[in-house]
Image (cartoon, helix red, strand yellow):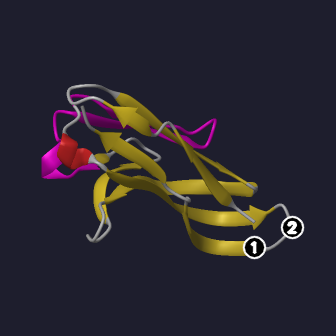
Amino acid sequence: QVQLVESGGGLVQPGGSLRLSCAASGGIFSINVMGWYQQAPGKERDLVASISSGGATTYADSVKGRFTISIDNAKNTAYLQMNSLKPEDTAVYYCKANLRNVRTNGGVYYRNLEVWGQGTLVTVSS
C-alpha cells in the first residue's frame, strides 16, 4: 500500500524554525501535487501549502513569507520549512499526496490516488 511518512514535528519557541518532511513510498507512481494541512484542536483541517511536481506553489495567507514548501521528485518527498513560528501555528500537520498511474508493491493499479499521512504535532510555546 502506498503510504506517506511524516517527520520533523516537535516543540519550538516562538520565532523558531522547524522543517517537516513527507516521504511517499510503497509503489511506483507519479506525483501530481503534495500538500501540507494543519489541524488545531477543535478546528477544521486547513491547507497550509501545496506544490505540484513542476514546482508551482500555493500558500495560505497566514503563512506567506514564513513557510516554504519544496519537493524532491527523485526522493518522492515534500518538505515544509517553517520559520518565524507563532503560537497560533500550533497544530497537527498532515501531508497529502495526489498521485497518478500508481502501481502498488502489491500489484494493484490506480489511475489516481489520494493518500494522507498520519500527522506530526508542531507545538509553538515558550
Is any part of residue 80 visible from this angle? no
Q: Residue furthest toward the front?
A: 126
Q: Where 2 falls versus 113 (above or below)?
A: above
Quarter of the image with the C terminus is top left
User: Residue tagged by mark 1?
Assistant: 109
> Quick check: is 79 in the magenta stretch?
yes
Q: Amino acid at mark 2?
A: Gly
Q: Which mark is residue 106?
A: 2
Is any part of residue 5 visible from this angle? yes
Element type where label 2 sits in the image: loop
Dot 2 and dot 1 residues touching (CB under 8 Å): no
- In-image side of 71 versus 126 (left or right): right
Q: Which residues are magenta?
A: 58-84
**Disc 2 from disc 1: Cα separation:** 9 Å
Whole-percent x and y of residue 96? 48, 60
Q: Where 50 falls versus 87 (above or below)?
A: below
- In-image side of 107 versus 100 (left or right): right
